[in-house]
Amino acid sequence: MDCIFCKILSKQIPNYTVYEDDHTLAFLDIFPCVKGHTVVIPKVHAETLFDVSDSDLSALTVGVKRSMEKIQTVLQPNGFTVGWNHGSAGGQAVPHIHVHIFPRWDKDGGGSMHSIIKKTGEIDVAALAKQFI
Ligand code: AMP
Ligand code: ZN
């Protein structure tokens, strides 16, 4: 499997581990956006969330929580921004799902998730909602 994160799992590529259990591995991002920037991956290869089984996803969520607890203890941030880039339009570069954990500090200059994408025009929410009925 020519997947850089699978190579980390098989120890062909080294990592700086933050947390590990039977189902997930969390390690420091090699190009961090902030001190403690961590990625959490399932130990089973899956490209996006849609490819992860519900049981693996449950385990991944626990791995994210445990990793955040570890980061909280070690770095004592004031908060976190947590999420994943899903698909190329969503900014995903590595095709093995990974949850980014960004520790946040008061007045660190970063924004909320809402600052990621700029609104391009008015959206009729009521009309849109009809598509979900
Ligand atoms: P994404 O754009 O969501 O696919 O993010 C992929 C992330 O993986 C980026 O933040 C990279 O800096 C990170 N990354 C790539 N290779 C490695 C590596 N060998 N060790 C740690 N982080 C990595
Ligand atoms: Zn993989």
Image (spheres, rainbow, N blue to C red):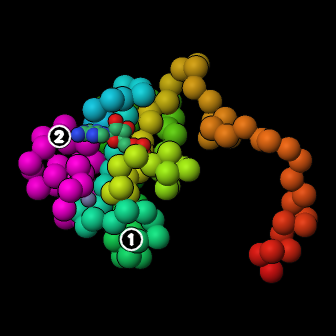
- Residue located 44% across and 33% down the image: 103
- Residue located 34% across and 45% down the image: 39
Q: Is residue 106 left or right of residue 12?
A: right
- Write down the residue under mark 2: 15
Q: Give the CA separation, mark 1 to mark 2.
A: 23 Å
* Percent of width and height locating residue 86: 50, 55
* Percent of width and height locating residue 1: 19, 62
The amino acid sitting under disc 2 is Asn
Q: Which residues are magenta?
A: 1-27
Label whose residue precedes the other's in the sequence (1 or 2): 2
Q: Is mark 2 within 8 Å of ligand 1?
A: yes
Residue 26 vs 128, above or below: the answer is above
Whether residue 95 is visible, yes or no, is yes
* Percent of width and height locating residue 100: 42, 44
* Percent of width and height locating residue 33: 42, 28
Q: Quadrant of the C terminus?
A: bottom right
Whether residue 85 is visible, yes or no, is no
SS state under label 1: loop
Residue 11 colored in magenta in the image: yes
Residue 108 colored in magenta in the image: no
In the drawing, what numbered circle is on residue 52? 1
SS state under label 2: loop
- Is the residue marked by circle 1 packed among few (<14), some (14-19), or many (20+) residues within 10 Å? some
- Residue located 20% across and 56% down the image: 2
The amino acid sitting under disc 1 is Val
| Image quadrant, ligand 1 | top left
- Residue located 33% across and 66% down the image: 46
* Front residue of 70 and 27: 27
How many labels, in total? 2
- Is the residue marked by circle 2 packed among few (<14), some (14-19), or many (20+) residues within 10 Å? some
